[in-house]
Every structure is written in C-alpha cells, then in structure tokens.
Amino acid sequence: MTVIPLGVPRRLLEFTLDGEPVRAPEGSTILDACRAAGKDVPTLCQGDTLAPKNACRVCVVEVEGARTLVPACSRKAEPGMEVRTDTERARHSRKIVLELLASSVDLSTTPRVAEWIKEYEAKPDRFGPHAARLNEEPKIDNELYVRDYDKCILCYKCVDACGDQWQNTFAISVAGRGFDARIAVEHDAPLTDSACVYCGNCIEVCPTGALSFKSEFDMRAAGTWDESAQTETTTVCAYCGVGCNLTLHVQDNDIVKVTSPHDNPVTHGNLCIKGRFGYQHVQNRD
Amino acid sequence: MDLHFGDSKPTDEEKEAVDALLGPPESSWEGADRSDADLRWARGGREARKRRDLLLPGLHAINDRIGWISEGALDYLCRRLTVPPAEAYGVATFYAMFSVEPRPATVLHVCTDLACAAAGAAGLCAGIESRLGLGSGVSVERSPCLGLCERAPAALAIKAGNPVRTAVSAPATVEAAVLAASAPDSADEEPPAAMAVPQAGEPGLTLLSRVGVVDPASLDDYRAYGGYTALRRAFELGPAGVIREVTDSGLVGRGGAAFPTGRKWQATASQPDRPHYVVCNADESEPGTFKDRVIMEGDPFALVEAMTIAAYATGAHKGYLYLRGEYPRALRRLEHAIAQARSRGLLGDDVLGQGYAFDLEIRRGAGAYICGEETALFNSIEGYRGEPRSKPPFPVEKGLFGKPTVENNVETLVNVLPILTMGAPAYAAIGTGRSTGPKLFCVSGSVERPGIYELPFGATLGDLLTLAGVRDRLRAVLLGGAAGGFVRPDELDIPLTFEGTREAGTTLGSGVVMAFDDTVPLPRLLLRIAEFFRDESCGQCVPCRVGTVRQEEALHRIVERTGAAAAGDIALLREVGRAMRDASICGLGQTAWNAVESAIDRLGAYE
C-alpha cells in the first residue's frame, strides 16, 4: 500500500492523439497522455523517477508542423497539438534506433527490448559482422555491484540519479565523446577509489542491467538466476527511523537483491547502502 | 553536495596556473594550508558553485601551462570551484584540445579536413611524423578543419608554458610546420588577415570594407573609418528602434539556420525574466568556413561594437564571445580590442556616456564542433559537457544560465552595423526580396584565388567561382560545408540566396563554397566527411552516436565499389540517414548525412 500524493488540481488541455481528441492535465508530456490513452510507446532512457533525458530516441512521435520527430517522453503536450504515434516515419526511426543500439551493445538483459525488436522488425545484424561494438569487460572491483558497460546505452539515468536529481554524490558522469563516450567515475578509476557511496540508486534506475548487484551478476554467470522463481516482498527497512520501503527479491529462500518501490512518496525508489545491500545478516545461518 | 577528492596533489606549477586564474585560495576548504579559522567556518554552497562557469577557463589554464591535465591538477581545480571531480573529468575528456594523459608540451595540429586533404594533407602528415618521431617533444595530431582553408594545407602548433606559445604554418610545408612546432617564437609571422580577402580595398564592400584598411589594433583607426557611428545611431533610436531597424532590414542569421534576427532580438527583449545575455557564436568550426576568423582578425572592433548594439537592443548588460580554441590570433586581437574599448568607455558601466552598462568576456572553446550548436555552447560556457539541450524551451526564453539569451554568429552581428548606418530600407535594397544584404562566402579548393568574398545575395554560384578563378575540370562544388551538400558543375547558375538554394534542393549553410576538380577522389572525400561527424558527435543521442559510426563503416565498405556492389550499402545509408535526420536531438546528427546523400543523388558518386 502506498500513499498517492494529491497535487494541486491542474487544468486539462485538449489535443489530438492519433486522430482522437484527448484531454491531459497541463504539464503532462505526450508520453503521459499516450499511456493514459492506453498506447504503448516504447521507452528506454525514460525513468519514472527522473527528469526525462530524451537521449535514446525510441519514443519519438510525429507532431504536426514539427520539422523533426519529437521525443514523447519530454515534449509537453500543448493545446491543439496534433500528435501521431504510429506513423511509418516514427516507426522507421524507432526501428533504426533499436538496430543501432542492439548492434552496438548487449541488450540481453533489457526488459521488453526483444519484444520491440520483433514488433518493429529490426535487424541489428544487418550492419555486418564488423560493426563497431563497445566490447567492454565487466568492471568487478567491489563486492556490492558490477558495472558491465557492454550493456550500457548511455541513457544518463545513473548520472542523474547519482547527481543533482537524487543522491547528490556526483560520483559518476559521462566521459569522452561520441561513440567513445562512456560512463565513468573521476579519472576512470575503480569504483573503490571514487566518490561512490554505494547507495545502489544507479542500479535501481539502470534500464539495461549494465549496473547490477554482484549477487545477480554471479548468479547469471552461474546460470542460477531465475526471475520466475523469485518472490517479491515489500517491507520496511529496520536500520533507522526513516521508514524506507524495501522490496526483497527472494529466490530459494535467499535474498538475491533489494529494490524499493518507485511510487513511495518518501524514497521514490532510492535507498542507502544499508537498505540496499545490508541484508546478509538476515540470512546468516551460522 | 558531498564532494570527495582523491589523494592526488597538484604540482606547484599546476597550482600556480589555477591560482593565476582564480586568485590564491583562502582556506583549506579550497586547497590552502589549514589555519585556525578553517575550524570554524566552511566555504562552499551556492556561492562557490556559482563559479562553475570558470571550469573551462580553468582547464585551459592548466592545459596551456603544462600541456595536459593531471589528476592532481583537475582535483585542485575542482576544489577551488566546488565541482565534482567526476563531472570535471567528463568535461575535460569532452574536448579534443585537452588531454588527461601525459603528452609532450608541444602539440602540432595538422589539419586533415576537406580543403587541406585536397591540398595534400596526408603527405604533409607523413612527412612531419617522420621528422618528429617519439622523443621529439612534439605530439603530432590530425585535426579537423582549422579554419585556414584559403591557405591549405594548414598546421597549428601550441607549445605549453607560461605564457603558452602558438604558431601557424599555412600553406604548410614539412620544414615550416616542424619549425613552428619546435620554435614557435621564431616561426614566420602569419600573413595579415586581408590576404584572405582577394577583394580587399575594392570599393563597394560593406562587411569587409575595413579588413586590410584599418589597423586591427587601433581603436582610433577604427573610428576614423566609421567605427562606433552605428552605436551612436543605436542610442538615438533607442532599443525598440534598433530592433525595428533590424527587423525591417530583413536580416536573417548567417550561421546556417537563417532565422530572422529582428524576431529573435524582439523575443529576447520582451522576456520579463532578468538578466538577459548576449552571446556571440564565434565557434566557427564548419569545415571550409573561415569568414568569422577573417573578420575577427581584420576588424575586431566591429564585432565588439555590434555586440554592444545587440546588448543595448535586447536589454543585456553582459555578453559572452565564445571563440573556438583553434583561433589564437583572433583571440589576441579581440582581447586587445575589448581592453581598448573598455579603457575608452565603450564598454563598462557607462557606454559612450549614455548610462548604459555593458561588458563582454571571451570564452575559449577547446576543440568541439558541436559547441557551435547554440545550446551546446551555453552548456560549454556554464562548465558542463558541450551537449545540446532539447528545445523547447528556446534560448530567447531560457538560454545561458537559464536566462533569456540572444545568440548570433559573428557575420550576423557585423551586419547590424551597416543596417544602422545606412538605414533599414537601403540595406534591404541590397540582395533579393527574401535574402537581403551582403553575404560572405568562403571559397576554397580548386580555385586560383581562394578566400572570403563579399557579394550581394543573388549572384550565382558561377559568378562567385569566376571571381575566385575556378580551375578547369571542375568535378563538384560543396555548398554549405560538411553539413551542406554537393552540386554539379552544370548547376552553376544556382542563385546564391536562401530561397534559390532551397529551390535547387540544396543549402547555403554557413557560406562555404568548396570546389573540387576531378583529381580529388570523391569516395575518399565522403569518407572524410563521415569521419568528421563520427569524431564530432557529442554522443548524447543514439541516432547520431551510433548512426555516424554505421555511416562511416558503410562508406568504408564501398570506397572502391560502384553500381550493384554498392547498392546494398547505399540503401542502408539512406535508411540510417533518414532516422538520423528525423530523430537526432540537434543539427549535427540531423545534417550528418546531407553531403553524402547529395553526392550519391546529384553527383552519382558510386555509379
């Protein structure tokens, strides 16, 4: 049970979505309106707890009068706007973006992407066997989490979550430029030499599994990770008095990772190192 | 903000370089020795963070003094400015002219872009590298366009130290470039800016009338040739009157987008949010473009005066001139011009005794084409990575530091001077109905007299090329630079106007006219254009970051193929190009496929 915050009532504005008149509260994005209307627009870099970065461009839609396609996740709906979400033009860009991404990084742990690749008939291997890829080795330099940048689509969510949007630690940023741009800590050092405070909020928002719990990474490597066999139980963290919600992911009677509900009005999915990683004492059976 | 700094310490020299910019540190919180007072107060918070925009100047200070940016130096700069080291590292690694790895104190940038490539840059590079091998104390780097296309091939040597020394060699020979790198102080002086203006001194010039005529270092000379009459007229007209004149003149932006300048000024002036800013985009990095450099080197006071007028019209009291890092001579000339103007009351608290306060500051870029995109430029000045912002909101509403900002490039701004001195109707009578005024063209490549030409809008491409002395066996003309398009030798009757080039399915872009004769291998040229965009993509959005790489790969595959053997890859290029044009965040990704597409469709490059 979570509390739904009641905001100030907002005026409704009217616009056209795929030919149908729709009403959306002032300030909503096109994506909000699409979702309210039950339309499935694919998104990768959009995060429900973060300001949209609109870097991935899979959510592009056509807006009457606009020279280029616009990202649904960040463009605010305006009165009288005519938006089309499923035109040949929008579908073409989505398809190419999915092909470009899937040909350069490993999307095997990205939820829903396989479904979209099929829906948009994307063929990532048509760029040939020599298409440049990231080809990065996973960075394993601590016992809590693994950075597998071969899976990174540069959505900037971890940077935003670590920086001014939530954690205010600013341990990570994007370094380099163009295809060589990479998520990195200062001086590209190991995580243990960085400003990281191991809150794991970057893992919470990572859309591709590039950032993961060491426990999950090890179990995947061993072939024992099985989400279908996991239960999720939301409880209250016992470490301090704030009362953060923890969702324990349990497989075979072991806690395998901890997340936090994004709609919790206190934490919005964020935790500290104790809540996120401090669970071994629960299952210490010595 | 809880900042964490590592153990790396700056050397004395690095610390000195930073302190020379920021002043000595006051407390141990920002790198001074600990004193008793430090136990009772903390320095930081909003006040300290307000200086974030000094990050780029700070990185320059270190790079200029040492030649590269060490961990200790970067951390010290971060402490001084309360910037998280991870973010500063992200900024330092964004720019091509900075290095976070040790390298020799001297870097020789050898241009390998379009005009220089056609003039034999590859051989020049090989010759230089065989002379300046390991241990020579010089790092030779292949560079995108240095903006010296009229003197191709070109090389720029930068020798770190106090002060930093630079030398340009163009047209470069192996010997001259090696001399510039090893002894920049004794290298030959660059020819005067007027050498880039074949029409210099001719009557009838408007924008270029003073280049080669006035002494660019003398404010008195500038005034003797009509300088500061436009600003006086502006004060007579009042801000609204100036905007009316600019609007009536029909002036549109000369940077490539051709947006009506008067409308932009009006939109900024009418914003209730304060302060307002004026930004001059002098980050001219489009391959083949060098007109802004010539104006800044040959007539720097004109730009200072024009920025002052723009500020007065839009209600700004502070201006930034964002100058690309590859223009050391323009930097020196402008620094001098600004200091002169300030000392004579033409900048400062009371401009021309009219009670209007305006001052301006130069900010130096560090090798990033993308920073010419207006919002990327704001991020760069503010001390962030030069990544474009999504629009809306537009700069007139939320620009530099989130405030209403008018941003114009150099050529656009200097057009304001004749508009005010001759009056809008007279100005609008020049050119055509929809493209008014004079226009500068940067002509290079296979012509006898490369350089900047000023013509009224409406002259044809053929007129311009005849003026520049086009050589026989012309194969193609690139209009508008790498983001523009190719046209055929049988299309020289295209009128050089915004509407004329649009009707012909091409663009005027930034005014580049690059001629190529049939000795230039077209597929190689296209490959260089693709390489340029791959190198210069900021990497923020997927269509551009990966699309530019896939484009280059496809062009590599077909570099020696034609017809059916190339058809599959051309189809792939079209599909990727279409998505890049439709879905990229900014103009770089949206235009990265233009030139290649035009070469395929108009020149039959792979038939």
Image (cartoon, grey):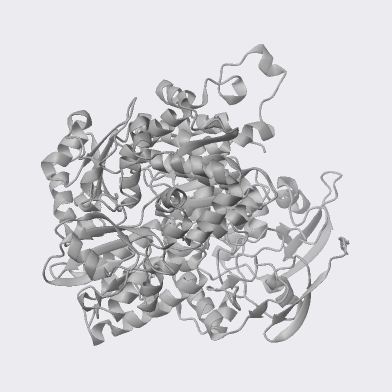
Q: Is residue A173 visible?
A: yes
Q: Residue at x 76, y 58 (%)?
A: A260
Q: Is residue A129 left or right of residue B43?
A: left
Image quadrant in which the N terminus of chain A is located: bottom right
In the rendered image of this protein, does residue B523 appear above or below residue B403?
below
- Left of B326 or right of it: where is B234? right
Q: Which of the 4 image quadrants contains residue B389? A: bottom right
Percent coordinates x, y for residue B38 in the rendering: 67, 18
Q: Is residue B462 left or right of residue B316?
A: left
Q: How many marks?
A: 0
Near-viewer residue (B485 or A43): B485
User: In the rendered image, which quarter is residue B137 located in?
Assistant: top left
Of the pair A152 and B493, the residue shown nearer to us: B493
Q: Position of residue B513 (x, y in %)?
A: 27, 63
Residue B104 on image: x %, y %: 28, 35
Between residue B419 and residue B54, name the one nearer to us.
Answer: B419
Q: With B586 as the anchor, is B180 left or right in this view?
A: left
Rendering coords of residue B82 (x, y %): 60, 34
Nearest the eye: B560 or B512: B512
Residue A187 appearing in the image = no
Task: State whether residue B17 is above or below residue A267.
Answer: above
